[in-house]
Image: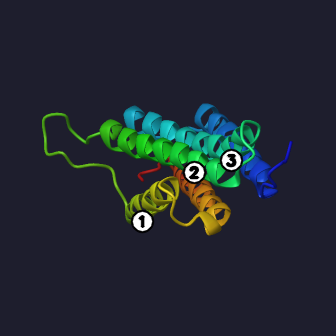
């Protein structure tokens, strides 16, 4: 059986994502905050979802490699799975985002950093869908890896917001 050589950093990305998830649990249990409990709970969910998404995305190619010997199939299937995962995450984020007042204007807790992450997520979704459709197959490992690093950066951003919001007298 011919084996496909995968980038070595996939394991590292999975490990870092798992560490973010663990630290999010510690911060949410040990941190004190004046934030609305719904906002705090949403931030914990968002951080865990992005870090588990990065971990799952990093473990997908090695799993698919056990089932196929064709590198093009590996990256097309992995890209499609990561595309669906990121699309599900983005949909969940916007559907579950807490509102300031249920009866008032639909003002969302949003920031410029979150806007950049949203735009980046959409760009990577287009790239991943294009790879699943057969484009960029020569650059597939690089594009896939950059999408995973983007998920790690998003996870780190959400982790920092969670830590900042877990300090007493936090307002963000």
Query: Do tag 1 and tag 2 residues touch (Cβ < 8 Å)?
Result: no
Q: CA distance from mark 3 to mark 2?
A: 14 Å
Determine crowd level at label 2: few under 14, some 14-19, many 20+ residues with C-alpha closer than 10 A. Answer: many
Task: Give the labeled residue for mark 1.
Answer: 116
Q: Quadrant of residue 40?
A: top left
Determine crowd level at label 3: few under 14, some 14-19, many 20+ residues with C-alpha closer than 10 A. Answer: many
- Which is closer to the viewer, label 3 or label 2? 2
Percent x, y of residue 37? 41, 32
Percent x, y of residue 106? 18, 45
> In the rendered view, does 5 fall on the left or right side of 163?
right
Q: CA distance from mark 3 to mark 1?
A: 22 Å
SS of the residue at dot 3? helix
The residue located at (72%, 38%) in the rendering is: 63
Q: Establish if 82 lies above or below 119.
A: above
Task: Give the labeled residue for mark 3.
Answer: 58
The quadrant in which the N terminus is found is: top right
Task: Give the labeled residue for mark 2.
Answer: 76
The front one of 89 and 7 is 7
Residue 162 visible at all = no
The mark nearer the N terminus, 3 or 1, is 3
- Which is closer to the viewer, label 3 or label 1? 3
The front one of 18 and 88 is 88
The residue located at (75%, 52%) in the rendering is: 10
Q: Establish if 39 lies above or below 109.
A: above
Determine crowd level at label 1: few under 14, some 14-19, many 20+ residues with C-alpha closer than 10 A. Answer: few
């Amino acid at each position: 059986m011919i084996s496909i050589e995968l980038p070595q950093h996939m394991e590292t990305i999975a490990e870092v994502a798992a560490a973010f998830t663990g630290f999010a649990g510690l911060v949410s249990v040990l941190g004190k905050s004046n934030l609305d409990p719904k906002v705090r709970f949403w931030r914990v969910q968002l951080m865990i979802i992005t870090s588990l998404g990065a971990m799952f995305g990093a473990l997908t190619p090695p799993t698919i490699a056990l089932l196929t010997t064709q590198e093009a199939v590996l990256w097309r299937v992995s890209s499609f799975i990561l595309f669906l995962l990121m699309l599900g995450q983005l949909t969940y984020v916007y559907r579950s985002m807490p509102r300031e007042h249920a009866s008032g204007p639909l003002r969302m807790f949003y920031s410029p950093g979150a806007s950049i992450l949203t735009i980046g997520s959409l760009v990577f979704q287009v790239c991943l869908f294009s790879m699943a459709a057969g484009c960029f197959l020569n650059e597939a490992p690089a594009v896939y890896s950059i999408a995973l690093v983007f998920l790690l950066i998003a996870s780190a951003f959400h982790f920092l917001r969670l830590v900042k919001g877990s300090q007493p007298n936090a307002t963000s």
